[in-house]
Image (tube, rainbow, N blue to C red):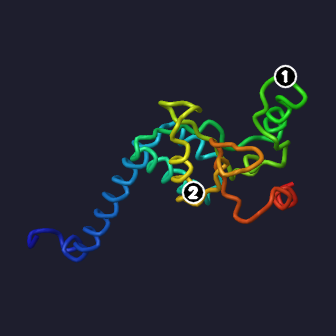
Amino acid sequence: MNNAPTWLREHKYQLIALTSIIVLVLVWFVVEYSSISKENRRKIAELDFRIRGRVRAFLREAARNGIHLRITEAYRSFARQQALYNQGHTTPGQIVTNAPAGYSYHNFHLAFDVVDIQKGYNAANWSLIGKIGKKHGFEWGGDWRTFVDRPHFQKTFGKTTAELREKYL
């Protein structure tokens, strides 16, 4: 180091710190993007920035428990929500939601649905999936009494859909 240029000797510790930060960021990037599929990352990007980290942590913990989840729905436009609501109510098909447009947290980037990639929607492990989701701060549709919706998770931040409609519309 005695033969090194003066600026390098004077800034040796700053360069070590900067190098350490770069390595940590690269490690985080590899872990973050290798453990979550491209499709799940795309769906997570549709969600409110305040819940994205929680969703990633939820998916990683589920994977550590041998449950590989795919996000099937995240943000829904009002038109998509209304079309899903109409299904089974006013158009043919099975009822999939009781929430018309503007009455779902999906419309406000605060909800997402998942499926177990290996076992599908008929998975026997919904209680564990729900437990993991709740651990990460989400309300689980599997706990609902009137319309049990096991694939559904949401973070409302204490806001009703009426309050969100007023704020965003």
From the top left corner, tell me how far across and down residue 117 is, in percent. Answer: 50, 32
Quarter of the picture containing the N terminus is bottom left
From the top left corner, tell me how far across and down residue 101 is, in percent. Answer: 85, 43
Q: Is residue 155 above or below residue 80?
A: below
Disc assigned to residue 92: 1
Quarter of the picture containing the C terminus is bottom right
Residue reaching furthest top? 92
Q: CA distance from mark 2 to mark 1?
A: 34 Å
- Horizontal side of 32 relative to 165 (left or right) equals left
| Residue sitting nearer the eye, 68 or 169 | 68
Q: Quadrant of residue 19?
A: bottom left
Task: Name the amino acid type tagged 1.
Answer: Pro
- Horizontal side of 75 relative to 13 (left or right) equals right
From the top left corner, tell me how far across and down residue 165 is, in percent. Answer: 85, 55
Residue reaching furthest bottom? 10
Q: Earlier in the sequence, mark 2 or mark 1?
A: 1
Q: Which residue is mark 2?
A: 134
Q: Image point 50% across, 31% down: which residue?
A: 119
In the structure shown, which secondary structural element does the residue marked by tag 1 occupy? loop
| Residue sitting nearer the eye, 163 or 138 | 138
In the structure shown, which secondary structural element does the residue marked by tag 2 occupy? helix
| Residue sitting nearer the eye, 141 or 32 | 141
| Residue sitting nearer the eye, 1 or 97 | 97
- The local crowd at label 2, few if under 14, some if 14 to 19, many if 20 or more residues have their Cα within 10 Å, is some
Q: Image point 69% across, 53% down: which residue?
A: 110
Q: Image point 60% across, 41% down: which residue?
A: 43
Q: Is residue 19 above or below residue 95?
A: below
Disc assigned to residue 41: none
Task: Name the amino acid type tagged 2.
Answer: Lys
